[in-house]
Amino acid sequence: MDRCYQPEIETMPVEEIKKLQSERLVKQVAHVFANVPYYRHLMEEKGLTPADIHGVEDLHKLPFTCKQDLRDTYPYGLFAVPMDDVVRLHASSGTTGKQIVVGYTQHDLDIWDEIAARQLVAVGGSKHDMVHVSYGYGLFTGGFGLHGGAQRLGATAIPVSSGNTKRQITILRDFGSTILCCTPSYAAFIGETLHDMGLGPEDISLKAGIFGAEAWTEEMRRDIEAKLGIKAYDVYGLTEIMGPCVSYECSAQTGMHVNEDHFIVEVIDPDTGKVLPEGERGELVFTCITKEAFPLLRYRTRDIGIISRKPCPCGRTFIKMSKPMGRTDDMLIIRGVNVFPSQIEGVLMERGYSSNYQIVVNRVNNTDTLDVYVEILPDQFSDTVRGVSAAEHELEEALKSLLGIVAIVHLVAPKSIERSTGKAVRVIDKRKLHD
Amino acid sequence: MMVKQISIFVENRAGQLLKVTDVLAAHQINMRALSLADTRDFGILRLIVDDADKAATALTEAGFVYSITPVLAVIIPDEPGSFSHILHVLADGGINIEYTYAFLSQSSDHACMIFRVENAEKATEVLQANGVELAMQQELYRQ
């Protein structure tokens, strides 16, 4: 059993959690209906009033909120309290579209600190820890989330922010940081830089890391753990809902517990919007049941995951969600089968291939084709055609058993797939289905 | 009695073979035998060069994927039926041939064939027991 920050809540019997969620949902719907005209309008369109929502069993009746709703109401159209009560704003970066802005009351920030403190305790943190925050500080929620959690816990927050990796290592060593918070790719880079400087895990005091805000694999987790000599934990969150720590990983390292006293998670079929049973893969949807300033109902994250209430050895009773397995906007439908580039990447990474790969989807004679181009590994190459073909075939078999459809694998020369300085182009869909 | 063959992964696109030969030329490496196996996506260029180690270093620097394989260089008389004779010897010895190609010989009285077999040691025994002459790497360049 893990130590918990708030054991009375984190290990609450499931029935009590549901009861608490129901009470809070009813209150929240009334708050939103009364204070957000946009939501009131959406509900009225469906013939709903707050009186129709009696508990979590009625959640499915409520309309979804999508990214587009946030854009349409930009900047403050979904705020549910007067600006006088808003004490902080954050914004999500506009890399995938127009930026969106969110607000917090003091009570909202208190909740955020509380759930971030839960995350820190779940990775073995206490007031004795030195929490090194290398997420960026600013409009991005990354830095402030764990910073607030560390202070709430009584630990020491070190607001290093991101960048200047050698300086990060100097601070890790001189200040005695024990818990590192940053993106997984930055953690890997800090690990590499540490080694390049002729240093190793024995030269730093880190024991754990909390890494989120981007997709990463189990292989990457093991790599970071070895390079930094730590346990690496996943954390999930999004600006629209709160920021980091909407869900948090425990010692079991097999998924993240959703803070169910503040958020209700659902998994839906992204095409039909139908709620899927636990254990089925679909789009993650969150409802904020305690947030005051920016309380989204049934927000479609476009992240694909699975939720499960199987008992966790850590003792927490909060439902667990898998690491996001991809984005609905990345999903390819090939011969009627849903395929996520991240699934293909997983197969390649497991076998030691480079993350530089390219997926080409085409339509030949009315049949979809899937081709995967991967850079060959030097130690796989022999002097016979058979050797290379066997490596291609092995990958094709692994992809077929995972995806259920045939992919043609092409091994190509090292460094022949174009490197990108920005967002890499991994998928080329030549089908032009919408022209 | 083995000769070092360098096998290089070459993508099946225009100009890819040239990239390899340019690297070898820049390092003054001389080729004596060459064979190219091709498939849909890639080819394997197999080379016997005067300095295999130097070639390997140059190819590594240039970022090529390659492997070094020991192969047999068999000296055969330059007359009809001599290649068949070698194949008989190998077949009788139960040796499976992966591939074979000719070596550019400067001598007029004999030819040289490169053999890649499954079990090179056993093949060497079988060939020598039948009086077949094998060449060493340095011998290939004495001519």
Image (tube, rainbow, N blue to C red):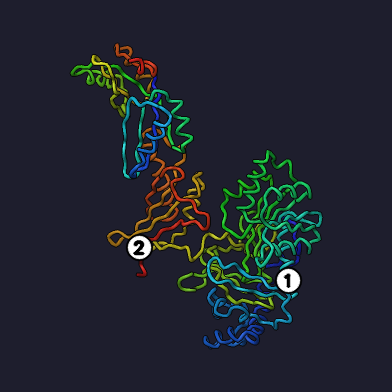
Q: Could you say which disc has been placed on residue A201 in the image? A: none
On screen, residue A181 above or below A384: below
Three-letter residue code for mark 1: Leu
Q: Which residue is mark 1?
A: A109
Between A258 and A216, the residue placed more toward the observer is: A216
Q: Which residue is mark 2?
A: A431
Q: Residue at x 37, y 24 (%)?
A: B71
Q: CA distance from mark 2 to mark 1?
A: 47 Å
Q: Quadrant of residue B25?
A: top left
- Chain letter for mark 2: A
- Where's residue A274, x and y in %? 49, 73
Q: Are marks 2 and 1 on the same chain?
A: yes
- Where's residue A285, x and y in %? 57, 70
- Mark 2, Cα crowd under 10 Å, few <14 / some 14-19 / many 20+, is some
Between B112 and A404, the residue placed more toward the observer is: B112
- Mark 1, Cα crowd under 10 Å, few <14 / some 14-19 / many 20+, is some
Q: Secondary structure at mark 1?
A: helix
Q: Quadrant of residue A294?
A: bottom right
